[in-house]
Amino acid sequence: MATGWNRDHESRGITQGGKISQETFIDTYDPSVLRREQYMLYEIKWSNNKRPRQNCCHSTQTEHAEIYFLEDVFQKQRSDPSAHCFITWFVSWSPCGDCCKQIRDFLKEQPNVKLFIYVARIYWHKREINRQGLRNLMNIGVSIRVMYLPVYRYCWRTFVDDEDKYEDYWPRHFAPWIMLYSLELQSILQNIPSCLEISSGENQTPVFSLCVENDQQKRALTSANP
């Protein structure tokens, strides 16, 4: 992988100070649209260091952001293998099934690492390999949640470049999509049928609809309140 600032994972929409541009954050983390790009905002806290490491990266055509983080970012940050590490990812798409497997293998080799994942959207939510991958992560203690409004505000204040930035960011209009994805995530983690339908409307605009047909799905809806 190339060295210096223009490396593939850390260039598009990300400043040299490790911040994401305002425009990129708003466009990429909007759950009502289906952007192809995957971005990751990450925070690493070590038990022997009070100052967290915070930065951004994105996927490339050949490598997803999760794998780049595990194989590049974490290895460069790691100093004391005995120190406990708390990692938080804020990702525009949830990990795919293949990435989930590599994350699981990584965590088995790193017993002192605790991972928290916040997702803006769920990647190909009806594919069983992706659903099972998320369940496997949950089963080994990974916390997986859909990004909700206070999380968007935290990311705005922490990761978005200050130049021409709004003073605050509270996207209330995201609430319906947050709820839909939260319901679908609960359906995945509880291993019950999918509740979320996404189709193409006029001008290829995605149309989201909810399909709740049985008591299991109704219980998932009850527990999905973010």
Image (cartoon, rainbow, N blue to C red):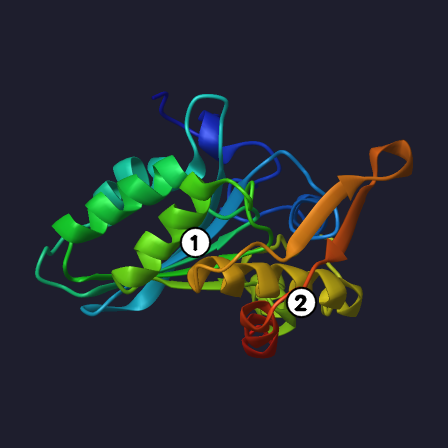
What residue does disc 1 label? 42
Task: Identify the image quadrant of residue 2.
Answer: top left
Residue furthest out toward the right: 202
Question: Which residue type carries mark 1?
Answer: Tyr
Does the rendering let one see residue 59? yes
Label 1 and label 2: CA atoms lie apart by: 23 Å
- Residues packed near mark 1 inside 10 Å, few (<14), some (14 to 19) or many (20 plus): many
Does the rendering let one see residue 96? no
Residue furthest out toward the front: 214
Q: Position of residue 25 (x, y in %)?
A: 65, 49
The N terminus: image quadrant: top left
Q: Position of residue 213 (x, y in %)?
A: 66, 64
SS of the residue under disc 1:
strand
SS of the residue under disc 2:
helix
Q: Nearer the viewer, residue 165 or 144?
A: 144
Q: Does 62 appear above or below 225?
A: above
Q: Position of residue 224 (x, y in %)?
A: 57, 72
Q: How many tags in the picture?
A: 2
- Residues packed near mark 2 inside 10 Å, few (<14), some (14 to 19) or many (20 plus): some
Q: Residue at x 27, y 46 (%)?
A: 74
The C terminus: image quadrant: bottom right
Q: Residue at x 63, y 58 (%)?
A: 195
Left or right, 73 with respect to 172, comes to left
Task: Identify the image quadrant of residue 130.
Answer: top left
Question: Which residue type carries mark 2?
Answer: Met
Residue 179: give its label.
2
Q: Does 63 appear above or below 49?
A: above
Q: Earlier in the sequence, mark 1 or mark 2?
A: 1
Left or right, 195 with respect to 83, comes to right
Q: Position of residue 15 (x, y in %)?
A: 56, 41
Q: Nearer the viewer, residue 63 or 221?
A: 221
